[in-house]
Image: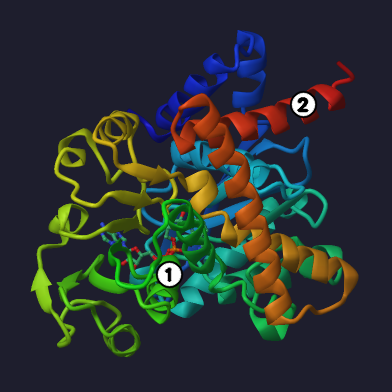
Amino acid sequence: MSATDATRWFFTRAARRMDLAERIQTLLLTPSRTVKVEVAIELDNGELGNFTGYRCQHANDRGPYKGGLRYHPQVDEDHAEALASLMTWKTAVVDVPFGGAKGGINCDPRTMSQKELERVTRRFVQQIHDIIGPQVDIPAPDMGTNATVMAWIMSEYSKFHGFSPAVVTGKPLDLHGSAGREEATGRGVMYATEELLRRQGRQLAGLRFAIQGFGNVGSHAARLLAEQGARIVAVSDIGGAVRNPEGLDIPRLLEHVARTRSVAGFEGGEPMPADELLVSECDVLIPAALGGVITRENAQHIRAGLVVEAANAPTTPEADEILEKRGIVVLPDIYANAGGVTVSYFEWVQNLQNFRWELDDINDKLRGRMAAAFETIYGLATRKKISLREAAYIVAIGRVGRATLYMMGM
Ligand code: NAD
C-alpha cells in the first residue's frame, strides 16, 4: 500500500463513521496542488547534481499551509502528498490556525557536504519562493533538515521578498527562532505519553522505553523521558542499535552520537540487530524515524503495551488493526508528534509580532495544548468506544470540514 493509500485508509474509516458524504470526502482528501521542481546544483567535485524537489499543499481553509521539508532519498510525490494530508489533520487536532503541506528533496544529506546542502536548499527556494510565504505556506524541519537549513530558506526567500522571518519555522535561536522549538516534538511526545499514563493511573518513572530513531525527535524524547525517571532500554538509528535493560545513560549516549554520528558502538550498552528494536522487551515503543515500519509482519510480535507515534505514519493500516485487536494502545502521529507544529506556531506568532516569549511560557503553552487535545480525543474515544486514532481523525475532519464549507459559502 502506498503512503497516500495508507493515510487515506485512516481518513476514510473515520469519515464513514461520521456519515460524511462521498463528495465531501473527496473534497477534503484532494490536495490543492503539488509542485515538482528540478533542483540542479554544482557538486563540490565540479559535476552536476540532479535532484527533484516537491511541495504538496494539501489544505489551507484553517490557515496558511504548514509542514516540514524532508531531505531523504525516498522523497517523492506520493510521500509528499501523504505527509501533507497528515499535517492538515494534525494542525486541526491541536487546533493551531494552519492547514497542511509537506515537501522535500530526494537527496541523501549524509553523503553531501554543508556547501552542497546549502546550494540545494537555496536552489529549491529559488524554484518555489512564489508559492510559499508567511501568510501562504510556511515550511519547517523534518527528517534530514535542521535549523541551519531553515536559516538558508529564510535568507534566500528574503532576497526575493524582503526581510521575512515568518516564512519558515524551526530557525536557529540567533536568527528569529523560538526558544524550545528544537526539542518541541520530543517534548510533545513526552507530554502526550504523560497524559495517557495519568488516565491509566501510571507514571513515566520506571517505565521501559524502546526508541527507533535518534535524530531530532528521538534523541530529545529520550533525554526528556530519562530526566523524568523513565528507563530507555533500547535505541536504534540508521547505523545500528544498542540496548541496556537497566536503562541507557542518555547524556553519555548523546555525547557518543555527537562524536560518531551513530548510536552504534556505544559502550554503555550491548549491540543488538536494529530490526529487533520494534519487537524488543519494553513497556512503551516509540517509532521516531521512517514511516511504514510497523507492519502486518511485526505487529504480532510487538511486546510494548503502548505505542507512541513520534514518526509520521509509522504504522500501516493492517498493523494498526492487529495492534488494536491485541489491546495495544496507540497514541497516533497526528496527535503524538504535534508538539513540533505547535511550537512552530508559537515561533510564527513571535516573528509576526517581533516579540520573544520565554522558554517556560512556551513549554507551559505547549503542555496546555497537548493536554487540551488529549482531553478531546480521549473523551470521544471513550464515549464511542473507538481507538484514539479514529477519534483524532474524527475531531480533525470535523474542524477542517466545517472551515472548508464556511469558506465555500455552503
Ligand atoms: P532526523 O533526520 O533528525 O532523524 C531521523 C533518525 O532516524 C536518525 O537517527 C536516523 O539515523 C534514523 N533512521 C533513519 N532510517 C532508519 C532506519 N531504517 N532504522 C532506524 N533508524 C533510522 O529526523 P526527525 O526530525 O527526528 O524526524 C523523525 C520522524 O519524526 C519523521 O517521521 C518525521 O516526519 C517525524 N516528525 C518530525 C518533526 C520535527 O519537528 N523534526 C515533527 C513531527 C514529526
Q: Is residue 5 visible?
A: yes
Reading the image, the residue beneath label 2 is 402
- Name the residue: 71% across, 26% down: 401
Classify mark 1 as within 8 Å of ligand 1 or not, answering yes or no: no
Quarter holding the N terminus is top left
Q: Earlier in the sequence, mark 1 or mark 2?
A: 1
Q: How many marks?
A: 2
Seen as rendered, the residue at the extreme front is 201
Q: Which mark is residue 221?
A: 1
- The x, y position of residue 220, in whole percent, is 44, 74
Give, as a three-letter code, the residue at label 2: Arg
Q: Residues within 10 Å of mark 2 (few under 14, many from 20)?
A: some
157 in relation to 12, above or below = below
The answer, for residue 164, to whether it is visible in the render is no
Q: Position of residue 222 (x, y in %)?
A: 37, 73
Residue at 30% from the left image edge and 72% from the top image edge = 206
User: Going by the image, does 83 lie left or right of 28?
Assistant: left
Q: Is residue 79 left or right of residue 19?
A: left
